[in-house]
Amino acid sequence: MKLPKIREIIEAVKALVHKPYTSNFPFKPHVPHPNFRGQPVYDPEKCVGCLACEEVCPSDALSHKDLIDDGRPRRQMIHYTDSCIFCGTCEAACIVDNQGIRLSQEWELSFFDRSTAFESIEKDLQLCEMCGSVIGCKDHLTWIAEKIGELAFSSPTLYQSRLKSIGIIDDNIVGVLKDFGRSDRVKILCARCRRKTTLTSDIVPFNLIGDGAK
Ligand code: SF4
Ligand code: SF4
């Protein structure tokens, strides 16, 4: 018969008086190690909806939908739990000091219905004030304006976004300035409409120019 080693005997004696070495799960919730890489979670306050994380995600676990048809334009940012490999690339690429999406300690990710295996947040969208196409998230435009400082004054889209975010102007300005002339140049515009308004003669209405101004 093979005799136990002294170390094993000591361990056995210790085990008689020591607490269990294993966790008491499921009776007590498991607390993972601080370096554990769990479910990435969006922070709706810090995320600006730029989509950089979606660009770098290696497993297509991040996606978005632009919802603009119900009068409340917004971007739904989606994380699909069942596709995520918890690599942390999204957090590393996040433009807001890696705070917009972060790996968490969340490890309990079982589900019965795979179609429910996602989490999402929503960010307000900025539409072009001429054609209504999507420019980006309002918070993202404000973030860029703050980032580049006084350089933002070279872009009406950026400085108008910044002024709106701090409440100096509101959407009424669009109605006041709806003349399809020179004043259109200070609106929040997509690149195509910016080009059109810049190339337009002030005496020719915008809606008569057509695509010739491309
Ligand atoms: S942790 Fe990796 S796989 Fe998961 S959402 Fe982020 S980038 Fe994609
Ligand atoms: S990179 Fe950061 S700020 Fe941009 S959408 Fe992803 S979480 Fe939000």
Image (spheres, rainbow, N blue to C red):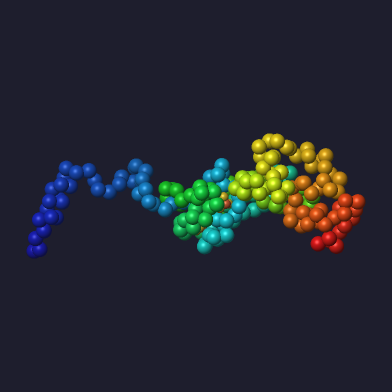
Percent coordinates x, y for residue 169 in the rendering: 73, 37
Residue 88 visible in rendering: yes
Q: Pinpoint residue 16: horizontal percent, then vertical percent.
A: 16, 45
Placement of 149 over or under 167, stated as above or below: below
Point out the residue furthest to the top here.
Answer: 167
Q: Image quadrant for the C terminus? A: bottom right
**In the current view of this chain or complex, which residue is farthest to the right?**
203
Query: Which residue does the image show at 37% across and 43% down from the upper left?
Result: 29
Residue 157 visible from this viewpoint: no
Q: Is residue 89 above or below residue 31?
A: below
Q: Quadrant of the N terminus?
A: bottom left
Residue at (70% x, 52% y) in the render:
135
Q: Quadrant of residue 31?
A: top left
Q: Nearer the viewer, residue 116 or 8?
A: 8
Query: Is 169 displayed left or right of 46 in the figure?
Result: right
Q: 208 left or right of 109?
A: right
The residue nearer to you, when weighing 203 against 125, is 203
Q: Quadrant of residue 171?
A: top right
What residue sits 70% from the left and 36% below the top?
168
Q: Residue at x 81, y 48 (%)?
A: 184
Residue 134 as seen in the image, left or right of residue 113: right
